[in-house]
Amino acid sequence: MKETGVDARILELFRAGDGFVSGAALSRLLGVSRTAVWKHVKGLRASGYLIEAVPAKGYRLLGSPKLLNRLDVTAGLATRRIGSSLICLNETESTNAVAFKMAEEGAAEGTVVIADLQTAGKGRLGRVWLSPAGVNLYCSVVLRPAISPVAACQLTFLSVVAVARAIEKCTTLAPQIKWPNDILIGGKKVAGLLNEMNAETEKVNFVVLGIGVNLNMRLSQLGEGLRHPATSLLEEGGVEVDRVLFARTLLTELDELYDRFLLEGEGPMRAEWLERSAIRGRTVRVSQGAREFTGEVQGVDSFGALLVRVGDGSVETVLSGDVTLIPGK
Ligand code: BTN
């Protein structure tokens, strides 16, 4: 979908009023001819905007396209860094792959890639992330923090807390966090995060935060044989989530948290992460390939590693693997 600066202004003017905007007013405010206004309206209609035209009254916006698009997501977005450049794709293999390539080619910090549909969405540990069209959010953000590669895992706190906050702001649901980067509602997974990094020994070149949130997907679309029980915000709350509003809210939260991370480090985010943790104090099974053990979760360290007290009283530092809650413990 290609919109020009004039398209964006027309949409802003439609949204600023609550009725019709005349062709004459549009032409005067935009500094273009009435024929040009009409051509832009036709272009916007072709992009899926529902625009009514009534003689002697003018134009009125009745609906925006269902596809996520840059103009809608950036309308009223007041972030400092995140979304400085925003690309909305109708379809791609993986927004992380696109953002990673763009970052390799020099994309600026804050560049965001969103897709309506992913044909090869990437999950953690080489898994597939189910990404049907028109219902969820698939989003990747390029960051270039001046930190060491070891500290980069702290950025997981940032994206997880941002998603949890966005869910709280856009729904009445209470998200919980499961280490390392799952968001659960009622014990079922509703969002996942995949951070990918390009670094040298001493310094990070860039990090891509990959965020997938099941917004309006139906249980029937979830498919059989998922590793963990999954759900969507619509299934849990019974209300369709406005995808544009959710995307904008998420970018705003990411921006605020990233500012704070650069100024104060991971401390404040880690505290928020722990407040929402579904597993603090609970007994879990940790699976790391062939190795499995159980223990009680004590918390997370400043690098995002899970601290688990095992049978002999010692504390294991878990850097990778899968964690399952043991029911009733
Ligand atoms: C997980 O396994 O929990 C992580 C899932 C991450 C999915 C998101 S969707 C947007 C971005 N692009 C991808 O290909 N993956 C991430």
Image (cartoon, helix red, strand yellow):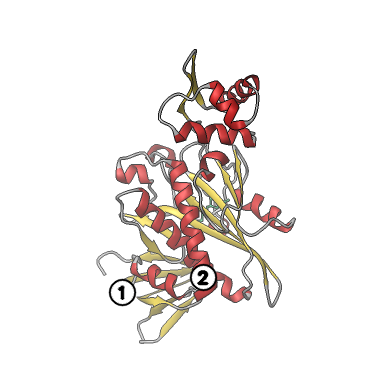
| 2 vs 1, front mark | 2
Pick whichever of labels 2 and 1 is earlier in the sequence.
2
Q: Which mark is residue 261?
A: 2
Q: Quadrant of the C terminus?
A: bottom left
**Mark 1 burial class by Cα count in 10 Å: few <14, some 14-19, many 20+:** some
Name the outermost residue toward the left.
Answer: 328
96 relative to 160, above or below? above
Where's residue 283, x and y in %? 32, 72
Closer to the camera in the image, 317 or 285: 317
Residue highlighted by disc 1: 281
Which amino acid type is shown beneath numbered disc 2?
Phe
Mark 2 neighbour density, 10 Å: few (under 14) some (14–19) many (20 or more): some
Q: Which residue occupies 66% across, 56% down?
A: 100
**Quarter of the picture holding the N terminus:** top right
Q: Residue at x 43, y 59 (%)?
A: 182
Give, as a three-letter code, the residue at label 1: Gly
Residue lying farthest to the top in this orientation: 55
Q: Quadrant of residue 143?
A: bottom right
